[in-house]
Image (cartoon, grey):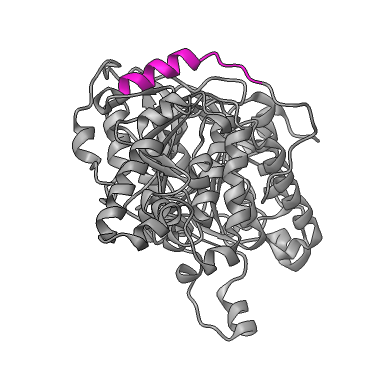
């Protein structure tokens, strides 16, 4: 006799309870390591009571290597949808308490479904990674399913924002999934990303290396540039996801969410005069400039410890999100190198994909010179930055704080590179090269033949700067739209953004450009 509906409902409820309860010993291990479980992470991430789980009872279909006895509901990943600050999102959280969070075919199919659903519905995707890698017992079927994840990540790029949080191991081929998303957040001390693990490295290369040394948060936030943000623990990581999402729209057709900050759009910023020295040789922290300009000083800097000679991040002006790209004179004098070019160009393309205006703060002495940079391909990497700015059709405003020399000034978005507004502070220097170098070339013979070479050199330098590199030259030749009093910078940026808000600009029809990668 077949079971009645009450019996089936009872069995279903028992199975769901088993899935929700998980393995107490495995959960305790997570807690002992200072980590939350997958369901605890979701509960803290989304608005209370908003999460709706899908495919809770999915299980591996593999029976080889004793897998039939190891089957558990969810197959090691919790998937579904919910809300964050009232906004719909799709998300998944790998569950280390079930089969160590290993990625089997059912597990991977669930993740691919979540990405696909987020894209179809035009909502952000959030992925919480915590897995020791692919479930090798399932053979080729798992690699096929993982391939679906890569495909969905790739075709969803530029359609919806994709945010990845690495909250445990993310090992082997699976690490390419977060690498295909827009932002990666790592937890210090408990998250690692790498393709090849320590045992294989030991066997092949004879090197002893720990998981943390190989792919911890420090490595990827400071050396490789893979991570955009780091957090001290799970709770801070989840808070960073919510904060980051507050700056970006739900999809490529939506506008970034405006937030009422209460910061007066007419507010003057006299502190900028003190932050930025007029002496071109003196360094300062450009992040302080950005914080002084944006609403309530709220600036979310990305990749802050990677390519530190350039600052990128998100802030608000009159409540509207904007992306900032700025030379950082505290490191390499703010010059552009291979890593800085990569860092900026990817961020610019993200902003352009999701309707976020780009504000560039220029104070650049040039591309960083040297044999090492040439060997690493500064020509190719620097070209990415030029390409990214030229390709972008969102509002683009460039403000020159002190100087812009050579091709590096074009790489920081001049009018000919598509800047809708180019503003300068007083006392700027804009030239093919710095005054000292130019004078040495142009007046070499006069200086050498002078009775007082150093005096002559200084006079020629003052003459050159007066004639060719000051604000009047930039205005007379329409290189810049206007000179801005530093204390009025915030006000002028807000006025310009308001004027540009409905900007429409088309590019030539084509399949796609070929970016120099």
Q: In the figure, 71 relative to 408: above or below?
A: below
* Total numbered labels: 0
Q: Main secondary structure of the magenta part?
A: helix
For the question of whether residue 48 can be seen, the reply is: no
For the question of whether residue 517 can be seen, the reply is: yes
The image quadrant that residue 504 belongs to is: top right
Q: Quarter of the image containing the N terminus?
A: top right
Q: Residue at point 41% right, 53% down?
A: 443
Q: In the figure, 179 relative to 255: above or below?
A: below
Residue closest to the eye, 209 or 506:
506
* Residue 83 rendering spot, x and y as whole percentages: 49, 26
* Residue 347 rendering spot, x and y as whole percentages: 52, 40
* Residue 273 rendering spot, x and y as whole percentages: 21, 34
Residue closest to the eye, 207 or 79:
207
Q: Which residues are magenta?
A: 490-505
Q: Residue at point 67% right, 30% down?
A: 119
Q: In the figure, 445 relative to 409: above or below?
A: below
Residue 497 counted in the magenta span:
yes
Residue 262 counted in the magenta span:
no
* Residue 303 rendering spot, x and y as whole percentages: 44, 49
Q: In the figure, 161 relative to 364: above or below?
A: above
The image quadrant that residue 301 belongs to is: top left
């Amino acid at each position: 006799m077949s079971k009645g509906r009450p019996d089936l409902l009872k069995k279903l409820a028992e199975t769901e309870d088993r899935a929700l309860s998980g393995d107490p010993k495995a959960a305790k291990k997570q807690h002992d390591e200072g980590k939350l479980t997958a369901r605890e992470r979701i509960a803290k991430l989304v608005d209370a009571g908003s999460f709706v789980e899908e495919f809770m009872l999915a299980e591996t279909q593999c029976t080889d290597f004793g897998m039939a006895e190891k089957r558990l509901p969810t197959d090691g990943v919790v998937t579904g949808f919910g809300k964050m600050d009232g906004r719909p999102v799709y998300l998944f959280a790998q569950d280390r308490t079930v089969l160590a969070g290993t990625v089997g075919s059912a597990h991977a199919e669930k993740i691919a479904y979540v990405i696909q659903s987020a894209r179809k519905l035009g909502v952000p995707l959030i992925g919480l990674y915590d897995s020791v890698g692919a479930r090798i017992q399932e053979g080729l079927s798992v690699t096929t399913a993982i391939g679906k994840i890569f495909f969905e990540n790739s075709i969803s790029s530029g359609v919806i924002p994709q945010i990845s949080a690495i909250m445990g191991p993310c090992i082997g081929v699976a690490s390419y999934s977060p690498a295909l998303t827009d932002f990666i957040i790592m937890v210090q001390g408990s998250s690692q990303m790498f393709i090849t693990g320590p045992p294989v490295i030991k066997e092949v290369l004879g090197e002893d290396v720990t998981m943390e040394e190989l792919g911890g948060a420090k490595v990827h936030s400071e050396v490789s540039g893979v991570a955009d943000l780091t957090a001290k623990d799970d709770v801070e990581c989840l808070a960073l996801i919510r904060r980051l999402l507050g700056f970006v729209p739900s999809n490529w057709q939506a506008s970034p969410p405006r937030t009422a900050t209460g910061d007066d759009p007419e507010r003057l910023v006299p502190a900028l005069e003190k932050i930025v020295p007029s002496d071109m040789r003196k360094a300062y922290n450009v992040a302080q400039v950005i914080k002084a300009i944006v609403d309530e000083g709220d600036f979310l800097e990305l990749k802050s410890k990677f390519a530190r000679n350039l600052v990128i991040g998100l802030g608000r002006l009159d409540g509207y999100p904007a992306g900032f790209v700025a030379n950082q004179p505290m490191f390499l004098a703010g010059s552009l190198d291979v890593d800085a070019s990569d860092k900026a160009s990817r961020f610019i393309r993200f902003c352009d994909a999701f309707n976020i205006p780009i504000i560039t703060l220029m104070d650049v002495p040039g591309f960083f010179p040297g044999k090492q940079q040439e060997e690493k391909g500064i020509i190719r990497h620097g070209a990415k930055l030029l390409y990214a700015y030229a390709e972008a059709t969102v509002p683009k405003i460039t403000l020159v704080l002190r100087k812009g020399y050579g091709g590096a000034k074009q790489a920081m978005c001049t009018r000919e590179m598509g800047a809708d507004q180019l503003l300068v502070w007083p006392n700027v220097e804009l030239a093919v090269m710095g005054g000292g170098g130019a004078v040495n070339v142009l007046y070499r013979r006069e200086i050498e033949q002078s009775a007082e070479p150093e005096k002559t050199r200084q006079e020629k330098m003052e003459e050159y700067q007066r004639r060719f590199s000051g604000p009047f030259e930039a205005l007379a030749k329409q290189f810049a739209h206007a000179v801005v009093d530093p204390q009025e910078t915030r006000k002028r940026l807000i006025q310009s953004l308001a004027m540009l808000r409905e900007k429409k600009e088309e590019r030539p029809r084509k399949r796609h450009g070929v970016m120099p990668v």
